[in-house]
Image (cartoon, rainbow, N blue to C red):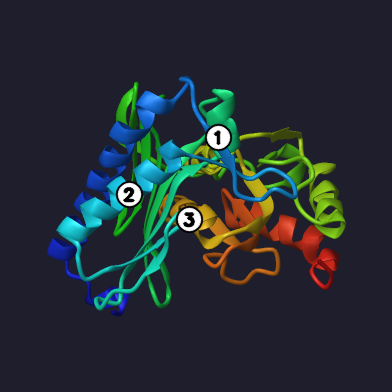
Amino acid sequence: MDRRTIDPDLQRALIEAAHAAADAARDVILPYFRAPLVVDNKRPADFDPVTEADRAAERAMRDVFANLRPDDGILGEEYGATSGTSGLTWVLDPIDGTRGFISGTPTWGVLIALQDEHGVLLGVIDQPYIGERFVGGFGTARMSGPHGEMPLRTSTQTTALGDAILLSTFPEVGSPVERAGFEAVSKLCKLTRFGMDCYGYALVATGQVDLVIEAGLNAYDIAGPIGVIEAAGGVVTSWDGGVAHHGGRVVAAANAQVHAEALKILEPFNDSV
């Protein structure tokens, strides 16, 4: 399905379905947060935690889409891919930032994206504990939370890396080469902070920070943030300026000027991983 053929009524129905899925995930997840919790390790070589909250939230969202959008495909972190016939696919990360979740920090979130063969059409970042939801796509870029509902707009004031605030989840970022690329940008920025999980991308959309640079992402880690940030006026690409919705190495920037400066610094690090 070409995005240009999605009429306004269908757009509204898709946005409503995304909200319904985010609501369902909230209801399932919150009783697990800061409560006794069994944590399994999906990758024994290091530590890749998963909990029943992750699994239950994805099941709840899949149930919503099975009811409201049965012809759409689904790609989820915990239960993989389910094919559809509509040309649309929901990309789900039930808890992005499970390490933060089990640590009790409110930096994790529920990520929902809708995409077609060309890329992301709609994105949601939801932080259930704080009660904040960030939605972008189909001409919508809004957030709701403790301060009410308001539009989302990335910052246009910071146009130089020397004034920029940079976020990433892990200090090690990725491979040694990717770490070196990140550090090359970081040393030029005004401030660098770590540990934000998906909440860092939401802060780009609000205009609070200017850059998120990460590596080693999966599609479900970045599709939702792409929808939100691009709708709010930002730019999200791979380190070489290509599409980012497949994952990998990602630069999310508040505006084209900061994005271009970051890519220029990262360019020497693109040939090696």
Kind of residue at disc 1? Val
Find disc 1 in the rendering and name its residue.
39
Counting from the top left corner in percent of width and height, residue 154 is at 50, 44
Counting from the top left corner in percent of width and height, residue 207 is at 51, 38
Callout 3: few (<14), some (14-19), or many (20+) C-alpha neighbours within 10 Å? some
At a point 60% along the width and 58% down the height, the residue shown is: 256
Kind of residue at disc 2? Arg
Kind of residue at disc 3? Glu
Per the image, label 3 sits on a secondary structure element best described as: loop
Discs 1/3, front: 1
Residue 158 versus residue 138: which sits nearer the camera?
A: 138
Q: How many numbered badges does the structure rendering display?
A: 3
At a point 57% along the width and 48% down the height, the residue shown is: 254
Q: CA distance from mark 1 to mark 2?
A: 18 Å
55 vs 146: above or below: below
Residue 232 can be seen, yes or no: yes
- Which image quarter: residue 153? top left
Q: Is tag 2's residue or tag 3's residue first in the polypeptide sequence?
A: 2
Residue 112 versus residue 95: which sits nearer the camera?
A: 95
Residue 135 can be seen, yes or no: no
Counting from the top left corner in percent of width and height, residue 260 is at 68, 60
Find disc 3 in the rendering and name its residue.
77
| Quadrant, the N terminus | bottom left
Extreme left residue here?
9
Q: CA distance from mark 1 to mark 3?
A: 16 Å
- Which image quarter: residue 168? top right
At a point 26% along the width and 40% down the height, the residue shown is: 24
Residue 220 image label: none
Per the image, label 2 sits on a secondary structure element best described as: helix
Q: Tags 1 and 3 in contact by the CB under 8 Å rule?
A: no
Find disc 2 in the rendering and name its residue.
59
Q: CA distance from mark 2 to mark 3?
A: 11 Å
